[in-house]
């Protein structure tokens, strides 16, 4: 996986987002075509795309330059999902939340970004230092 993350770190945010969209389309197709007979078979089909998205999310969050970061004021929903980044790192480190629980975006006290944050990325040292919070959206 480390070789692939290094390759992804060379891609632009647009390229990474496009690759994530392609993976999500494939995952949706797998979901739609699954007959429900075997959870193990379903997971085997999805796992390569889940693994790839972990790397893509980490690379996208780390590669975004200030001109590509969009910040939006938080509404009440975002404020309910906001946690200090140090707390989120702790949660990820001890598996209190996982990437399978939901998804998140980097944030500051009053604004949320368009940058994805993942537990896998956090656990593997891919942490942006220019944000103070995370908005974590549990499923």
Image (cartoon, rainbow, N blue to C red):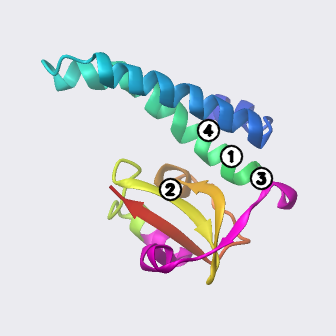
- Image coordinates for residue 114, horizontal then vertical, percent: 66, 58
Callout 3 touching callout 2 (CB < 8 Å)? no
Measured in 3D between alpha carbons, the distance from the residue under mark 4 to the one under mark 2, in whole angstroms, is 15 Å
Per the image, label 4 sits on a secondary structure element best described as helix
Q: Which residue is mark 3?
A: 64
Q: Nearer the viewer, mark 3 or mark 2?
A: 3
Residue 79 in magenta stretch? yes
**Farthest residue, direction left:** 37
Q: Which residue is mark 4?
A: 56
Q: Which residues are magenta?
A: 64-90
Measured in 3D between alpha carbons, the distance from the residue under mark 4 to the one under mark 1, in whole angstroms, is 6 Å
Q: Nearer the viewer, residue 111 or 124?
A: 111
Q: Residue at x 65, y 56 (%)?
A: 115
Residue 101 in magenta stretch? no
- Image coordinates for residue 88, horizontal then vertical, percent: 47, 70
Measured in 3D between alpha carbons, the distance from the residue under mark 1 to the one under mark 3, in whole angstroms, is 6 Å
Q: Residue at x 45, y 74 (%)?
A: 77
Q: Quadrant of the N terminus?
A: top right
Residue 1 visible? The answer is no
Callout 1 touching callout 3 (CB < 8 Å)? yes
Q: Which residue is mark 2?
A: 123
Q: Which residue is mark 1?
A: 60
Callout 4 touching callout 1 (CB < 8 Å)? yes
Q: Work out whether 76 lies above or below 1.
A: below
Q: Residue at x 53, y 27 (%)?
A: 23
Q: Is residue 139 left or right of residue 71?
A: left
Q: Is residue 101 left or right of residue 118?
A: left
Measured in 3D between alpha carbons, the distance from the residue under mark 1 to the one under mark 2, in whole angstroms, is 16 Å
Per the image, label 2 sits on a secondary structure element best described as helix
Q: Nearer the viewer, residue 117 or 69?
A: 69
The total of numbered circles placed on residues is: 4
């Amino acid at each position: 996986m480390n070789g692939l993350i290094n390759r992804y770190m060379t891609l632009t945010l647009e390229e990474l987002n496009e690759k994530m969209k392609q993976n999500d389309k494939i995952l949706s197709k797998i979901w739609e075509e699954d007959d429900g007979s075997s959870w193990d078979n379903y997971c085997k089909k999805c796992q390569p795309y889940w693994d790839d998205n972990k790397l893509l999310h980490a690379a996208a969050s780390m590669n975004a330059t200030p001109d590509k970061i969009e910040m939006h004021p938080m509404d009440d929903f975002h404020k309910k999902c906001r946690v200090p980044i140090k707390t989120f790192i702790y949660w990820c480190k001890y598996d209190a939340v996982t990437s399978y629980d939901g998804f998140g975006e980097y944030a500051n006290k009053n604004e949320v970004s368009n940058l994805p944050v993942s537990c896998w990325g956090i656990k593997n040292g891919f942490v942006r230092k220019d944000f103070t919070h995370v908005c974590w959206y549990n499923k």
